[in-house]
Image (cartoon, grey):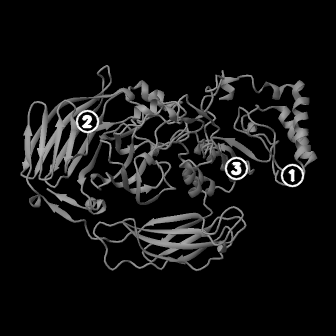
Amino acid sequence: EISRRFPRYTEPAHDPEWLHAFMERTVRMVERDKNHPCVIIWSLGNESGYGPNHDALAGWIHGYDPTRPVHYEGTIRTGERKISRSVDIISIMYPSLDRLRELAEDPEDDRPIIMCEYAHSMGNSTGNLKEYWEMIRKYKRLCGGFIWDWVDQGIKKKTPEGIEYWAYGGDFGDIPNDGNFCINGLIWPNRKPHPAIWECKKIQQPVEAEAIDLLKGVFRILNRYDFTDLSILDISWELTEDGEVIQEGSLPKLYTPPHESEVVTVPFKIPDTLKPGAEYYLTIRYRLSKDTLWAEKGFEVGWSQFKMPFTVPPRPEIKLSDMPPLKLDENSEKIAILGEKFSLTIDKSAGCLCSLIYDGFNLIKNGPLLNVWRAPTDNDVPRLAPIWRSAGLDRLRHVVRSIRAERVADQLVHVVIESSLNTPENVEKFNCTYIYKVYGSGDIIIETNVKPGSNLPPHLPRIGLQLTIPGGFENFTWFGRGPHENYCDRKEGALVGVYSSTVDEQYVPYIKPQENGNKTDVRWVALTNNLGLGILAVGMPLMEVSAHHYTIGAFEGAKHTCDLKRREDITLNLDYMQSGLGGGSCGPDTLPQYLVKPEPVTFRIRLRPISPGESPMKLSKQVIKD
């Protein structure tokens, strides 16, 4: 980027007339800091090209202070694949995994390798971190890296109405400026953590467990500390059944030395009675056994979670013959289906539900409709979003081709909707068939068949369904990963469990608004009012979910958080998959395995009204047998 914007920036490094200036600054630095024990490495500078003048600096430092190594990232930019021998450490910024592997496997070089900048954390970011740390742990020469960077460098301002927001480049009449390119930290300016920090904590935690025999509870505990044995930790465990703790205990004190491991047995018991369709997880937690200078006793330094392979009974079946009958009414504009406790209406021109009435409350205002768009993240903006927009993905409209309803049984009605997503120029981008199966129980299984057209980008923001839920259903509960926001390439730090929150709390206030609040590996999600009445959505089997009082367009159009205007209605996204986050604002894009491909796909989601006192977990386990 620097060489593109300033093509001559490296010339001083090659110009002998600049050598004295280079040397003067370096000597001053070394003389100033040589007696500080916290200074362990000398650097020749940052992003200032590379040339003979840098070699001269390294030579002087090595002669003056042979006790400390020298690094400089610029030495990797020689125009060849060879790296200057004037430095003791190979430094690199934002390498791809392939480039990092190439360096680590170079048989002609044994110097340590440090990513002096990586995992650019601008906005909703820090994807792919797991893969980098898998490689770091695989190769001894890889020493890790420095995430860019620690804190969002925003300055608090107020609108004329007194609304506070974090300002960035251009908000002060400053020209030129770098916009929000200073907003790339793991924490906000007020030092509150971004969701990504939990991913960093999990992936870099100093202790981990590997399963040897899950059913017997045998695990290998790995001590990744460099100088400390595991006696500083209290290790506990818990066994959960569909998110509820049913057994728990502690392990004996371990004295495992640094960089070694120890085999332990977790003494759980397989429940005598396993619930039909239940999921069981064993979680091992590592907490400080005493106060330290940086944290109090009981602070959790890490955890390990394992899905237990218990053979559970099959899920309970609901027979069609046990359901109340349905009434089907149809005219030129609408299809109405009436059940014993509910009624729904499908708008033929829109090709989706315009109401789902249950116990006097409307649960759905609009939808579900196929959605492939998201408010671009900071990582999407440089390369991906322009490609998506050029394909018209941000301007697609639904065109209904045909719609028909059929009574299959007294208790079952099928509705088939053929539609497409077209650009404003009426170019078809996606062909979509929705098959509604409406049951007398109130369950609605929606099968969505998506066939992408031609001239699409190599990958998409997402594929899923979007609904508008009326305001008032603020309670947000889900069984999946949480409690914080997570994405397919940033979910290692999110435990599988049952979480309760609100729709308002799903909003993550990134300084420049963008896609946020997603949850992965969701089994079910319930949105309910204060009476406990609402709507349940069940993945078949899993889905990604987000819910906001803002539309995608609102996030996309806002430059600051103060630009967002909360509305009462709720946008609910039930996704087959959303593409990952990557680090493309300054570094590698999302890895291929985390991208949504424009390929034919079929997915199913079950919707159902939920009454006060009903268990969403129990309802989610039911299997409907036609």
Q: Which residue is mark 2?
A: 432
Residue 308 at what x, y percent from top left?
A: 41, 69
Dot 3 and dot 2 residues touching (CB under 8 Å): no
- Label 3 amino acid? Pro
In the rendered image, which quarter is residue 2 located in?
top right
Front one among 298 and 450: 298
- Label 2 amino acid? Cys
In the rendered image, which quarter is residue 332 located in?
top left
Residue 136 at what x, y percent from top left?
A: 63, 54
Circle 2 sits in a helix, a strand or a loop, which is it? strand
Q: Which residue is mark 3?
A: 107
Residue 483 at what x, y percent from top left?
A: 46, 55
Relative to 176, 597 lies left or right: left
The N terminus: image quadrant: top right
**Camera sees residue 188:** yes
Q: Label 3: how many residues lie within 10 Å, few (<14), some (14-19) or many (20+)?
A: few
Q: Which residue is mark 1?
A: 36
**Camera sees residue 105:** no
Mark in front: 1 vs 3: 1
Relative to 307, 171 lies left or right: right
Measure how far apart labels 3 and 2 are at the Cα level: 53 Å
Circle 1 sits in a helix, a strand or a loop, which is it? loop
Up/down of 449 relative to 482, above or below: above
The C terminus: image quadrant: bottom left
